[in-house]
Image (cartoon, rainbow, N blue to C red):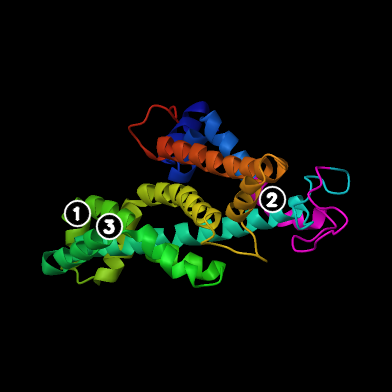
Amino acid sequence: MTTQELTKDAVAAPMRKSVLYWRRFRRNKMAMLGLVIFGLLIITAIVGPYTTSWSYDEPDFMSLSDPPSAEHWLGTNTAGNDLYAQIIQGLRRSLVIAVLVSGATTIIAAIVGTGAALLGGRAEKAILAVIHFLLVVPSFLLIALLVAGSGGDWKVLTVVLIAFGWMFYARIVWSMAISLREREFVVAARYMGVSQWKIITRHLIPNIGSLLVLNLTLGVVSAVMSETGLSFLGLGVKTPDVSLGTLLSTGASGLESSPWLFFAPAAVLTLLTVSMAFISDGLRDALDPNSSAGGTA
């Protein structure tokens, strides 16, 4: 095959969007660093329990508030629990809550926001009125009241965070979807009798996919911080279960006498939030066609 034929084949086969996005993403060194850190945290959360002989809820009464040692790599707390095992469990719990909350709120926001834009008229005004009302409600107080009586059940905390976390994203999705509802492909789909649900899932949502991906990544950070804040105040996950927030709360009370109880989970939380921030910056550059930060393909 000649060079001219190879050139024609390259021109005839356009680059897939996924390949283009990945090439732009990997040019961002900080985004790649964040991806590596986040991947290592996930691997640690999965394999971590198999790397220690201690369980997170198994106390060692002979080692109370001991500093890091060969037996307890990150030390123990006042109850004798191995801090390394507890951090692994706390990371697992916080990641599960964050991923579930971020994924569910993104899906709800995408459906409600695009649905309001597509319906228009009174239905759109009613949906927006509900969203605006929920946005001005002091959600933190309501979340605290609802979670306080759950006994520290992480599943209740997850449901409550989802219930009060989708409105802001839905408002953003609606503002972008209203510019799409008059586009030719949406008008043509309506004229052909395509159902509104198919228009939402096949035409509107795919065209704001970049925004939803960013919301998903940023939502993980937001959910982690919400869960950590509530658990730190004693309103989230409670013993015998642990999360990064409960570990920080316990460590803060003995910061002077046992600093390792605070700084170790704080370091893990910092790595988690910073890595997701780097990833979201890289995705923003990769998905935005007007961005020059990601380089050219």
Q: What are the residue bounds of the magenta stretch? A: 40-68
Q: Nearer the viewer, residue 71 or 175?
A: 71
Q: Quadrant location of residue 69?
A: top right
The residue sitting at 17% across, 60% down in the picture is 187
Mark 3 — residue? 135
At a point 70% along the width and 46% down the height, the residue shown is 261
Q: Secondary structure at mark 2?
A: helix
Q: Which residue is depicted at the point 36% across and 48% down?
A: 211
Going from N to C along the chain, the mark reached first, 2 or 3, is 2
Where does label 1 land, which residue? Answer: 178
Q: Is residue 2 magenta?
A: no
- For label 1, the SS is loop
Amino acid at dot 2: Ile
The image quadrant where one finds the N terminus is top right
The x and y percentages for residue 244 are: 61, 52
Q: Determine if the magenta segment contains residue 57.
A: yes
Q: Is residue 20 visible?
A: no
The front one of 237 and 53 is 237
How many badges with numbers are in the image?
A: 3
Residue plotted at (14% across, 64% down): 125
Q: Is residue 137 above or below residue 244?
A: below
